[in-house]
Amino acid sequence: MKRSINTFGLLCLGLMFVLSDAGAQMRSGKLGVGLSGIMGNISGDQASTSFGLGGGLSVAYSMTEYVSLRASAQLEQMGFKDAAGVSGKTSMFSGNGYLALDVSPNSTFNPYILAGGGYALFYPKLTGQNSSLGVSTPLDFHIAFGGGADIFFNEFWSVSAQGEYVLTGSKKYDGFEGSGKDKILRFSLQIRYYFFDQDFIAKLLDAQAERYEKKK
């Protein structure tokens, strides 16, 4: 038991030393899970719209150094106002998946572009009304594209700023069926904690051993 504790302690010390000496992030096999804050705006046929707030979960998994999978599940609320000046809000829950290309992987700053799609449940309502505005099928498939940047504080924590343009499959996100399908502009701020696959420590130790061999 004592030997196991000592071995574990030495392994932790070795990992801390490797991480402090590593010059760049090892992206492959990293899974990040966290929270996001959202601002969204509907581009539809109503007289005016306004940004609303929301939040949700954010997930990122690095397949390789340049390619990652990202996903989100979020609840948000966006405002609109019709030609008569009556205001309303659209409540929306959506789940999205993206394929992201890391443009220039770096130890601290990682810009990326992404594209993907997802499904949304949405309910537009006028102020003071309890029923949705004639939306008989509130489930909608949409596609999205955009970009952002990850800022890594260390191997385990990051903050990401992301913007995306969403092409919906419905004309009724703002409660009014107009001439074209609605669009959504969305900005998010995400914070994530990262986990590693079972080979991560071995990769780090191998990389460190290689580095010392080259110095000899």
Image: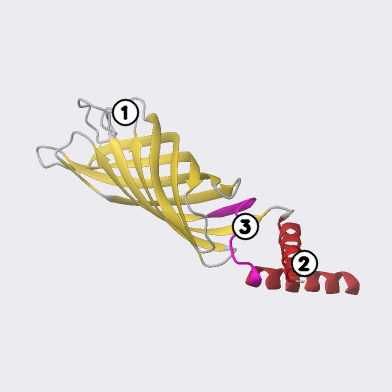
- Taking the image as shown, residue 93 lies to the left or right of residue 67, namely left
User: Magenta region, mostly helix, strand or loop?
Assistant: loop
Vertical comparison of 24 with 183: above or below = below
Vertical comparison of 72 with 134: above or below = below
- Taking the image as shown, residue 77 lies to the left or right of residue 87, namely right
Residue 116 horizontal/vertical position (percent): 45, 37
Q: Is 202 a magenta residue? A: no
Q: Label 1 neighbourhood size at 10 Å, few (<14), some (14-19), many (20+)? A: many
Mark 1 / mark 3, whichever is N-terminal: 3
* SS state under label 3: loop
**Quadrant of image for the C terminus:** bottom right
Residue 127 vs residue 80, the one in the foreground:
80
- Taking the image as shown, residue 88 lies to the left or right of residue 201, namely left
Residue under the point 14% across and 39% down: 47
Spatial CA span between label 2 and label 1: 60 Å
Spatial CA span between label 3 and label 2: 20 Å
Q: Which residue type carries mark 3?
A: Met
Residue under the point 89% across and 74% down: 2
Magenta-tinted stretch: 21-33
The residue wearing badge 1 is 170
The residue wearing badge 2 is 213
**Quadrant of image for the N terminus:** bottom right
Q: Nearer the viewer, mark 2 or mark 1?
A: 2
Residue 78 horizontal/vertical position (percent): 28, 45
Residue under the point 22% across and 35% down: 44
Q: Which mark is residue 26?
A: 3
